[in-house]
Amino acid sequence: MERWTLSNDRNTLRIRRQVVGRHGEAESTLVYEREAAAVPVNNAVSPPSNSPKTRFGRRVFKPAEPGYVYTKIDGFDTPTQTSKDAFVSCLAYGDPARIYVEVGIRSQADRALTIAADFIGLEQAGRPIHRTPTLRASEEIHTGALRPFMPVPTGKHPQTGEALYDRSSVDQQTKRHLELQEQESTFASVLLAMGQTGATILQPRQERTVLCTFEQRHDRSAPFSVTVRLGEDVFRFTFIE
């Protein structure tokens, strides 16, 4: 279940999602802020410098082509493209082995748009990268977040060899573990809420965000392209390490 709230000035959209799954109930809130004007960027590799470098603890990939228009979405300066029927944003983050692609769509058409199940594709070095079920990634991340805390000893007793723990070090490790656990649980919930399992319909003036995962066996660092297909419109975003 999700609840959308638009501010009176129509510049801030809040999406509150409540997800019930096999691991229990989770809730997340996403905030999208629209700037008064989009920021054109002429630099081929660098978005505005004040944009966060990570999302959910994962490194954000840099756009690799000039000419994108950036719009601030959920605090990130996000590359966007537009056509007569749709406004599309694309953010990519993760690592070379698993890439998360977050695509936002705002319909500008006067008719319903069909979002196909495979409307997002990813290619690297001229070959397609395998798209994997977002639900599976969500379950893996959620399972990892539930791992018990095991403090790292600071040394060993010189005579008995027993592990020694420093109280200050354990406190810091505990704090970091809890922060990471919260981050991963939130990300797992977002993946579950934004994952797409089939074709959907976008009504006129409606907005939607889809998050999908792509994986490859080789941990390869190279530019990659994300293709978004909406009917006859094709939007292409290129990113680099």
Image: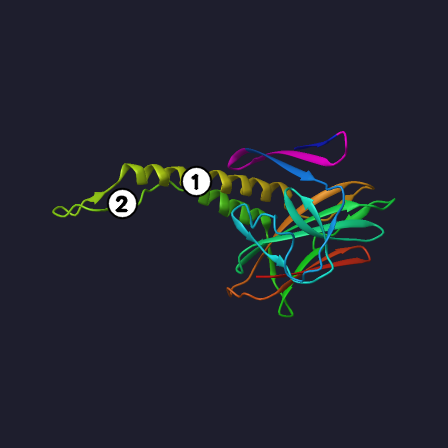
Query: How many other residues sit within 10 Å of disc 1, few (<14), some (14-19) or many (≥20)?
Result: few
Principal SS element in the magenta part?
strand
Q: Secondary structure at mark 1?
A: loop
Q: Earlier in the sequence, mark 2 or mark 1?
A: 1
Q: For the C terminus, which image quadrant?
A: bottom right
Which residue is tagged 2? 153
Q: Quadrant of the N terminus?
A: top right
Q: Residue furthest right?
A: 110
x then y, percent, for residue 190: 59, 41
The reply to whether the magenta stretch includes residue 15 is yes
What residue lies at 68% left-to-right and 39% top-to-bottom?
Answer: 32
For the point 76% across and 29% down, which residue is it?
8
Q: How many marks?
A: 2
Q: Which residues are magenta?
A: 8-25
Residue farthest top in this picture: 8
Q: CA distance from mark 2 to mark 1?
A: 21 Å
> Which mark's residue is nearer the viewer, 2 or 1?
2
